[in-house]
Amino acid sequence: MVEPTIAQPTASVCQPPRKDEYLLFILTQARATYEDIRATLPPQLPTNFCQYLDDTVVRVGGFNQLLDAQGWARYFNEIVGLSAFVIQATPSRNAPRLPEYKPEPLADGYAVLVDYFSQPEIASDLRQVIGRDVGLVTYAQRPYLLALHTQNEREANSKLQQLSDRGFIGIVVDSRSVILIRPVVIFE
């Protein structure tokens, strides 16, 4: 006698990223986890449950900036504990060559750095508080948001106090030890 089986819904094959789009793939086998992931992400990001190679993943599209997608991947890897990674479209053969990436240390002075705990939305909150663009830097091999770069130690300490009063976790450091990754974090 043959035992009856219940058909499990199969995930469709994941669609590739559009040109200039980055995708976040989060490995999961359960649709319940998919719903939890959807509830965590901003509602404007399109998500679906699909098959990528031999894995079932949650596909999150709508990222135009690599750093945004990487921030969410870091969040799901480090905070949520799910394996996540970013993919992008293969550049066309006749695409113009991009300038070489050359991170550089900041000039002399003081840098006010804010720890964003792998939560990209903190950059938006910080920008609202300081009223200007926020940069992305590394210091002691960790990523930080750059709130201020100044020659004036008093100004740096005052800014740190202002940010601490608003709930941000920050530090003032010798800016020569800070590497500028991106002068402006772009919000899409």
Image (cartoon, rainbow, N blue to C red):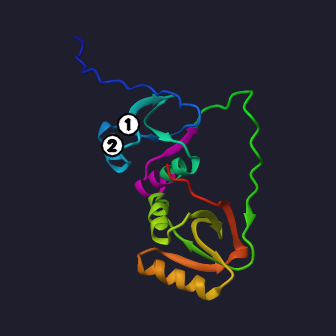
Name the spot of residue 10 as percent of width and height, x first. Answer: 36, 24
Instruction: Determine the residue positioned at 29% across, 40% down.
Output: 32
Disc 2 element: helix
Residue positioned most to the front:
131
User: Is 161 on the left-hand or right-hand side of 104?
Assistant: left
Q: CA distance from mark 1 to mark 2?
A: 8 Å
* The stretch drawn in magenta includes residue 132: no
Q: Which residues are magenta?
A: 74-87
Task: Give the label, 1 or 2, closer to the camera.
Answer: 2
Residue found 53% across the figure and 28% down from its top: 16
Tell me the kind of residue under disc 2: Thr
**Of all residues shown, which one is farthest toward the bottom?**
154
Point out residue 36 in the picture as x, y percentages from the top left corner.
31, 46
* Rendering coords of residue 137 (x, y %): 63, 64
* Residue sitting at x 42%, y 81%: 165
Name above or below for residue 156 compared with residue 72. below
Crowd class of label 2 (few under 14; some 14 to 19; many from 20; radius 10 Å):
some
Give the labeled residue for mark 1: 29
On screen, residue 186 above or below 45: below
Which amino acid, mark 1? Gln
Q: Are marks 1 and 2 in contact (CB under 8 Å)?
A: yes
Residue 64 pos. (x, y %): 54, 42
Q: Which residue is mark 2?
A: 33
Image point (59%, 84%), residue name: 155
Which residue of the protein is positioned furthest toward the top in this rendering?
1
Q: Secondary structure at mark 1?
A: loop
